[in-house]
Amino acid sequence: MQIVLHRYTLKLRHYFKIARDERSEQPTLIVELKDGETSGYGEATTNTYYGISYQNMAECLEKVNQKLENYTFYTPAQLWEDMKDYFGGNPFAQCALDEAAYDFYGKKIGKPLYQIWGLHLANMPQTNYTIGIDSVEKMAEKLKEMPWDLYKIKLGTPHDIEIVKELRKHTNATFRVDANCGWTAEETIRNSHELKKLGVEFIEQPMKADAWEDMKEVFAHSALPVIADESCIVASDVSKCFGYFHGINIKLMKCGGLTPALQMIREARSLNMKLMMGCMTESSVGISAIAHIAPMLDYVDMDGPMLISNDIAEGVILTREKAVFPERNGIGAKLRA
């Protein structure tokens, strides 16, 4: 077996801004796991906030590549366990290989992932569509450009309530808001009561990841459910969030792939917490991996291909009515020519 790396730059349809970052393009790395007969594909985008670059992902994957030359592949979970010590704290690279391993495995046994897991596509939640921080006029234009039933509104400005009030004039869709660690406890509690009146479903990560005492206060007094993102990175974080958040948002790249994500899902369900999975502006490779696990979730944010203008792959297609799965095995994604 061997790993082949493919580098791309994804072009965003709109300049994208959140409380701590802004960009017009997104570099991404596609990992191809192959044995001469079958290729599986996985993806990880670069991320300055978490210190992830092409270079440090490639360095990790080269170490793994040396171990794969005479490796006997059994299952993706076994590969994840056997190779976990070679990633040096780089879960993004680990995620890309893990997705590729599941794609490879599904193709080998002739089944799409959701069937391997015994899931039913009728149980899939609809993805939201994300509106990044901008002038309120621009944010309203994005709503009109993409009519949808669920919007995630990025907040973390001095005018957040005014923004949501203005956007509400343009649609009856359900809103979710994500402050990306941009609020205080007092702001979160106060905003929650106003946002509930405006048809907001929940608040995602309102405060800094380590603000546990403040989150306890928010958990007790918020008018809306609060969902952990930056506070819940890996499986051991799930139990820490119990009693501080009503649910968790799993990011495959941050936890290290589908294998640990399945563990996080089991742990959260045992605590009766809500489950969400989010994306990090992946192409249809990474998004197709998320789509297969989505029937296990309450909420999903997998709008990556909708936010870019040069999708490098064909995979699960997202429409307002449903997600359309290709008749292919594994994750069902293939690179465009």
Image: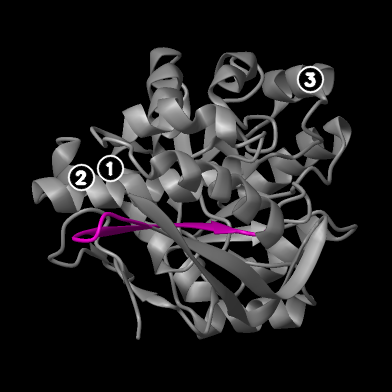
Amino acid type at circle 1 is Pro
User: Foreground residue, 265 or 200?
Assistant: 265
Q: Circles 1 and 2: CB distance less than 8 Å?
A: yes
Magenta span dominant secondary structure? strand
Q: Residue at x 14, y 43 (%)?
A: 115
Amino acid type at circle 3 is Trp
User: Foreground residue, 124 or 196?
Assistant: 124
The single residue placed furthest to the left in the displayed view is 110
**Callout 3: SS:** helix
Q: Residue at x 37, y 75 (%)?
A: 313
**Callout 1: SS:** helix
State the separation of the CA atoms marked 3 and 2. 36 Å
Question: Which portion, as a residue range, is magenta?
Answer: 33-46
Residue 114's tag is: 2
User: Foreground residue, 94 or 258?
Assistant: 94
Asked if residue 35 is among those painted magenta in the image, a careful observer would answer yes
Q: Residues within 10 Å of mark 1 (few under 14, many from 20)?
A: many
Question: Which residue lies under the disc numbered 3?
Answer: 212
State the separation of the CA atoms marked 1 and 2. 8 Å
Residue 297 in view here: yes
Q: Residues within 10 Å of mark 3 (few under 14, many from 20)?
A: some
For marks 1 and 3, the one nearer the N-term is: 3
Q: Circles 1 and 3: CB distance less than 8 Å?
A: no
Residue 295's tag is: 1
Snapshot quadrant of residue 48:
bottom right
Q: Position of residue 51 (x, y in %)?
A: 77, 49
Q: Position of residue 114 (x, y in %)?
A: 20, 45
User: Foreground residue, 193 or 22?
Assistant: 22
For marks 1 and 2, the one nearer the N-term is: 2
Q: Position of residue 252 (x, y in %)?
A: 50, 43
Q: Residue at x 56, y 27 (%)?
A: 85
